[in-house]
Image (tube, coloured by chain):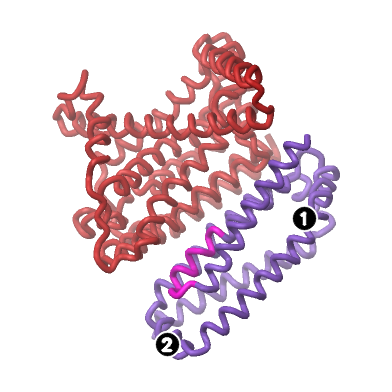
Chain colours: A purple, B red
Amino acid sequence: MAAEQWFANLSFYVVALVTLASALGVVLARQVIHAACLLLPTLAGIAALFALLGGHLLMAIQILVYVGAINVLIIFAVLLLHRQVDRQRRILAGTQHLFAGVTGAGAVTLALVVGALFSNLPQLVGGEQGRFGDDVVAGIGEMFLTKYLLAFELTGILLLVTMIGAIVLARKERDQ
Amino acid sequence: MDSSLIFTIGNALRTWLEGLCRAHGVPTLVVDILAWGTGAVLVVVLGLLVALFVIWLERKVAGYIQTRLGPTRVGPVGIFQTAMDALKILQKEDIIPRGADYWLHLAGPVLYFTALVLGFAVIPWDVKATLAATVDLNVGLIYVIGVTSVGVLGVVMSGWGSNNKWSLLGAMRAAAQIISYDVPLLLALICVVMVAGTLSLTRIVELQGSAGILGWYVFKPYLWLPFIIFVICGTAEVNRTPFDIPEAESELVAGFHTEYSGMKFALFFLTEFDHMWFVGLLGATLFLGGWYSPLGAADPIPGFVWLMIKSFIFVLVLQWFRWTLPRLRVDQLMGLAWKFLIPAGFVALAIVCVAVLFI
């Protein structure tokens, strides 16, 4: 048991190190495209942390939404807007290092705080699994349709509005 | 079927290795890690071997469809041709174009390959496959979709990192195509999940085994539309003709892997053929009853073999598509996804809703 605990700790530290290092890379990267690509190990590392805590649903959703969708979107934006971003970077060149340093320090501090909170998280996750039994997905789905129905429906409406907004914006561009 | 041959041999081998390790005083934890590691390595090696075989099969199928013989020289019916090609490509020079982004150029193929291999972790190979590293994840299907969608990033990275306009155009096309076809694919998979009532791939297979061959989801009429959508989107996901505009040879040289040579190119090549097999495995698991035999429970053939046969039916169908259909244009491709497949997916979802409620 002690050996397994030790192994779990080791995996946590390796994953945390990778996540933090790539997060620092995101902030310190000279090229925007490198920063955008380094988001991948950062977000995937967070997914790995969820997996270590036994939250498999959260891990899968984290990969699907953040890595598979949001990160792709960011990289797309960088590819399409690269020239403009370059120009802005030249304007910001003087303050860049200061800005990067402050943000990096902030990120590390935040990560340390989150790390301190992690000591409580295993119990929380264990509690969820205890409440829902084996089938966490079904349990969460039921909560969505009973206790959190209003929030769930509101989120749905928000997404619908966003989608319609995106279509309207895209059409206006084309008409001009 | 529990006493299938592969299963028995695998377990015996594992017990023997574990005993050997314990006899020499290796701690249990190390033995466990070694067992997981061996399973993971076995799955990857199996994937690579199957990729070699699929490439050979592709050349044979292409040959017969075009009334020629395909490879014949190396080994009986040319079976070792691809293995020799792999040895040759190992010795090739790795060329990185001037002005290319070194790290992105390197990370592209690696990520493309890794994203696919991660998906193999949850494929249920056999009844209780302890031989391979199969994880019965509670959210297996979401995991598969999430992990394989990361491969797009590899394509975009390599397209950008190559500093070549063909590569970049190919990468943009690939990303647009994969993201578009993910939507109807997800709709088709949701139909299966609704019928099964679970996201675990192992559980989905088990539910299909209850009523013999007629219990397979492909024989349920309300799942025919999702099945067709799955096959079309699966073809699009692996970038094969008629959906191979990301690497359209007549327009874009080779698309996103134009600037790759040596092993990096081989990694792209292997991943594409492995991905085709992966779509076959997923289709066999979700629609064709996974490891279950069509002959009933008394069948002596191991479930793993049945899974392979079923997945190769998909592979052969995809190859048949490739060598008989012409390539679509970009606008036709997007039109098919957004104007036809997504509405069809919603119709399928509605049909399955009614079926689940009333049947």
Task: Name the spot of residue A65 as percent of width and height, x first.
Answer: 59, 59
User: Residue at left 56%, top 72%?
Assistant: A164
Quadrant containing the C terminus of chain B in the rendered view: top right
Kind of element beneath mark 1: helix
Residue in the foreground of this view, choosing between B90 and B332: B90
In the image: residue B308, left or right of residue B247: right
Q: Which residues are magenta?
A: A29-41
In primary-sequence order, the first of circles 2 and 1 is 2
User: In this orientation, does residue B335 appear?
Assistant: no
Q: Which mark is residue A90?
A: 2
Quadrant containing the N terminus of chain B in the rendered view: top right
User: Residue at left 52%, top 50%?
Assistant: B345
Please, which chain is the residue tagged with disc 2 on?
A: A
Report the Cα–Cα distance between label 2 and label 1: 48 Å
- Residue A52, compared with residue B46, is above or below; it is below
Q: Which mark is residue A110?
A: none
Q: Which residue is mark 1?
A: A144
Magenta stretch: dominant secondary structure: helix
Quadrant assignment, res A87? bottom left
In the image: residue A150, left or right of residue B8: right
Task: Name the spot of residue B77 as percent of width and height, x first.
Answer: 21, 21
